[in-house]
Amino acid sequence: MVLVGFTLQPEREYCGLLEPLLVEDADYFEVTPETTWVRDGDELFRPNGFWRLFRELGERTGKPFIAHGVGLSLGTFAEDGARLARCLEAIRMSQEAFRFLWYTDHLGATVLDGRAVTIPVPLPMTSEAAAAVRDRLGALQEIVPDVGFENSAFYYLLGKPLEEPAFFGRILERPRTHLLLDLHNLFTNAVNLGFDAEAWLERLDLTRVIEIHVSGGSASEPEWLPSRRVMRLDSHDAPVPEEVWRLLERTAPRCPNLRGVTLERMEGTVGEGDVPLLREELARVRRTVG
Ligand SMILES: [Fe+2]
């Protein structure tokens, strides 16, 4: 059976409004471990209030957690051993507490030259980059046996979009390394970079997909770019578009190792009026993959 999950965000209003959905409609909770840590003065990490809030929800409902991190920086080539060691130690501490079923991070670099960048930077689709990501996944695998990466939403690429699936295949050589297939990221890239999402999926090894993400997004403001071009944003702030539902309907049955489909939503974008819609979206995911 494919499980249906929902994202926990570090916002008390969000968790309060969505409590009935989380307790009654979700099979598991997705946590970004970094949102449950604070950095201590001595460079160690310690749990924050959301660590306690999320764990309490897990204990009360008996539902499992999966991890979707942002800070491992799977695509960092350069030496950042000290930072990586601290990050892995915090992940180890989180794994002991949350018992994640699997752990994914975003494909790309989120740390460059020792500095954190806001969103993942795309990687060159080379064997060196594939090896760097494989190494990081290998380090993560010493803590959580099933690990993987998510296809990111990028606003430019270093290479051709239809070459991405083959690049993913070169990364996922080892057993128990998986792809988190984010269909809204794929849709966003297809719109912004001008390619056919179905053709991209035809090239992808769907046997490696452990999880699928669905979500919505919105459009950028014309004033943001000198050209006034409007881009689709991976902003998780709106209903799942019909194009993404169609991708889910066609793709999920072709993923033999799919374990979960997660509906993602960003904190600060949920009001009381959105809760019934989100419950219906979770029900639609269940009808689609159940
Ligand atoms: Fe995602």
Image (cartoon, grey):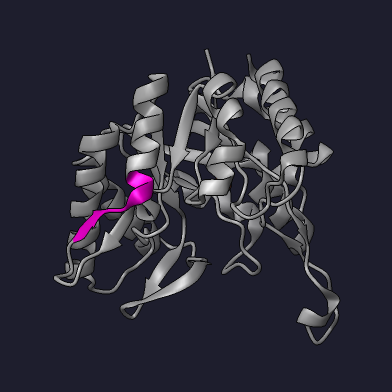
**Residue 171, image x, y percentages:** 40, 48
**Residue 199, image x, y percentages:** 72, 43
- Residue shown at 46%/37% (left/top)? 30
- In the picture, residue 198 is in which quadrant? top right
Residue 63 in view here = no
Q: Which of 89 and 19 is in front in this view?
A: 19
- In the picture, residue 163 is in which quadrant? bottom right
Q: Which of 28 and 199 is in front in this view?
A: 28
Image check: 42 left or right of 140?
left
**Residue 193, image x, y percentages:** 74, 63
Q: What stretch is highlighted in magenta?
A: 45-51
Is residue 29 positioned above or below 23 on the image? below
- Residue shown at 21%/66% (left/top)? 40
Q: Quadrant of the C terminus?
A: top right
Is residue 174 positioned above or below 155 on the image? above
> How many callouts does the rendering have?
0
Image check: 164 left or right of 106?
right
- Residue shown at 73%/45% (left/top)? 197
**Does 93 appear in magenta?**
no
The residue lying furthest to the left in this view is 42
**Residue 214, image x, y percentages:** 65, 39
Is residue 91 positioned above or below 285 on the image? below
